[in-house]
Amino acid sequence: MKVAKTIDEIRRLVADARVGGAGLVGLVPTMGALHEGHFSLIDAAAGECDFVVVSIFVNPTQFAPNEDFSSYPRPVENDLSGCESHGVDAVFAPSAGEMYPDGFAATISVSGLTESMEGRHRPGHFDGVCTVVAKLFNIVGPDVAYFGAKDYQQSAVIRKMVADLDMPLRIAVCLTIREADGLAMSSRNAYLDDAERTQAPALYESLCLAERLIREGERTAARVIESVQSLLGEKAPLGEVDYVAIVDPDSLAAVEEIEGDVVIALAVKFPSARLIDNMFVEMKNAK
Ligand code: PAF
């Protein structure tokens, strides 16, 4: 496994791989602190692609000034050995200066899909994500890029950016990987103290409750949201609910009457970490 720190180096590695016969190049963009969720994306890439690149870059532009950029975990050696053991061909781990040299002035902004949920609660976040992801796509030139369904809105926004800007690659969205108690894997779970960690599975529990209510025939989104909020209030009292939303899977517009497939998405702020999760509810088997 090669580790490239500059844009020139990673471009050369990918070009050499293509000359050497690599047909499909896969990219797994990450901010490091890799866990089983990331490794499932890497495994999916390794299963489909001839050459797998993982980028590790804690992207400053997607964090607001009050967020956790400086404390974000950076266990570089662990990440590299995890990549190696999952068969990654090249890691791209640039510095902030390499990605954003002095005078950098471009931003990619996707409107509409970014206006609710994470976009509303983290202004500017998706501009940072889209800009860095577009740069990574331009630098690595992958045929397929892999993202986790845990960040449902992020993958919808990236798919839209790719479609609208005619970027020549496919976006693969892989299932959320969960701990045994249902908590969605996230690098930020490491911040949770024992009491918060005990309460955190309530996020998934509340999504399961929402799904059950819908399957049993509840069609009014506001009533489902109320039940989710009350379960969170009871089982995760250390957490403050940022939002609970029931949205159309494509437009991400809030749904009032549940008639077709929906995504239930939520964010809960514990004192040590803000967690997000979501569930896609397919209506074809519902009552
Ligand atoms: O999902 C993440 O880890 C980040 O938002 C991403 C896609 C790597 C961009 O920095």
Image: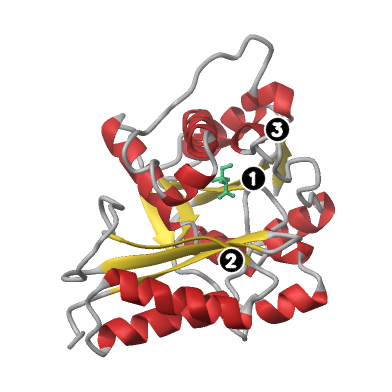
Dot 2: element? helix
Residue type at tag 2: Gly
Q: Which mark is residue 90?
A: 1
Q: Which numbered dot is residue 35?
A: none
Q: Is residue 147 left or right of residue 172?
A: right
Q: Is mark 1 within 8 Å of ligand 1?
A: no
Q: Residue 235: image x %, image y %? A: 61, 82
* Residue at mark 1 to residue at mark 3: CA–CA distance: 12 Å
In the figure, is residue 15 to the left or right of 269? Answer: left
SS of the residue under disc 3: loop
Q: Is residue 85 left or right of residue 30?
A: right
Residue 83 x, y percent position in the rendering: 68, 57
Q: Amino acid at mark 3?
A: Pro
Q: Which residue is mark 3?
A: 94
Classify residue 85 by image quadrant.
Answer: bottom right
Residue type of the residue flagged with mark 1: Ala
Q: Nearer the viewer, mark 2 or mark 1?
A: 2
Residue receiving disc 2: 37
Residue 240 vertical placement versus 51 (above, below) = below
Q: Who's the residue at 35% across and 36% down the image?
A: 161
Q: Nearer the viewer, mark 1 or mark 3?
A: 3
Crowdedness near tag 3: few (<14), some (14–19) or many (≥20) residues, C-alpha within 10 Å: some
Q: Quadrant of residue 270?
A: bottom right
